[in-house]
Amino acid sequence: MSILVIGSTGTIGSLVVRGLAEQGAQVRALVRQPGKASLPEGVQAVVGDLTDVASLRTAMTGVRTLFLLNALVADELTQSLQALNVAREAGIQRIVYLSVINADKYPEVPHFTSKHTVERMIDRLNLPATVLRPAYFMQNDIGIQPVIEGYGVFPMPIGATGVAMVDARDIADIAVAELLRRDRAEGPLPAVTLDVAGRELFTGESATAVWSQALGRQIHYGGDDVAAFEAQLVQNHVPPWMAYDLRLMMERIQQVGQIPADGAVQQLEAVLGRPMRTYQAFVAEQLKKA
């Protein structure tokens, strides 16, 4: 029986596919176009789309375990609910779903509320699933590195409450561990929810300080202006609906932060058997690549 990875070509999904393949798992990767994705040897590509129920049914035939990651799209909620319903039809009783940290505390943010609704479905229907709730990805800051280095400004308006940034590689490693734990169990395991976050909380100012230290020169925090943030996204050809969604997210980050539950990081490190990666190490790694 296979593990089906939905969202297999993105930042997290591609790492999950590779990690599972390295562990000798039988992996299927859902792709939209045949031959376009570069997959590890032995991984089976299955063509499908979350908007196409028939293709989901085909992809899930003979599947034992499901990893569901849905990209930020306008109809994310419909796509995710359809995928889980088709999984139920197929008798899949081993699921790992990638949500977002504090999903229940961001009611006005469309993609957070979509994920929280999916979490509610998992809970109400007693689906045997691991819900992973990652915080802000460190890899988000790869896109702003040219601004930081070229203009001396850290432009992400994450505010002063605190964000427990997490490396995407750690998220993927935890997802792989949970997929294998469920897949190798004799029967369905109880549902569990894990906040996936780093050890240290970062504010706009403290994240900026990491870059200043790493570059050996003063970098300035760009401030908390979310309207300017939205306008910059649109200028960079981000769809207006998405830019507004991300603006709302930043507003909420400034208000409540992204803070894991007590003991969450220790639980993650027990799963991994090592410490979580740090933002300082991530920044140093990115500067070496530049």
Image (cartoon, rainbow, N blue to C red):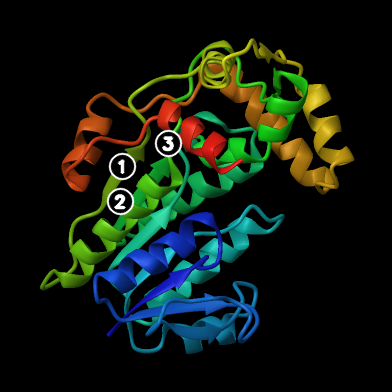
Q: Mark 1 — residue? A: 194
Q: Toward the viewer: 270 or 6?
A: 270
Q: Is residue 44 visible?
A: yes
Q: In x, y percent, where is residue 91?
A: 32, 80
The quadrant where residue 254 appears: top right
Label 3 neighbourhood size at 10 Å, few (<14), some (14-19), many (20+)? many
Task: Give me the C-alpha separation between circle 2 and circle 1.
Answer: 10 Å
Instruction: Select label 2 or label 1 by which is in front.
Output: 2
Q: Is residue 272 left or right of residue 73?
A: left
C-beta proximity under 8 Å, tags 2 and 1: yes
Q: Mark 3 — residue? A: 166
The quadrant where residue 4 appears: bottom left
Q: Is residue 141 left or right of residue 177?
A: right
Q: Is residue 128 visible?
A: no
Task: Give me the C-alpha separation between circle 3 and circle 2.
Answer: 12 Å
Residue 17 position (above or below residue 140): below
Which amino acid, mark 3? Answer: Val
Q: In x, y percent, where is residue 115?
A: 52, 48
Q: Mark 2 — residue? A: 174
Q: Quadrant of the N terminus?
A: bottom left
Which is nearer the N-term, disc 2 or disc 1? Answer: 2
Q: In x, y percent, where is residue 184?
A: 16, 71
Q: Quadrant of the C terminus?
A: top right
Task: Give me the C-alpha separation between circle 3 and circle 1.
Answer: 13 Å
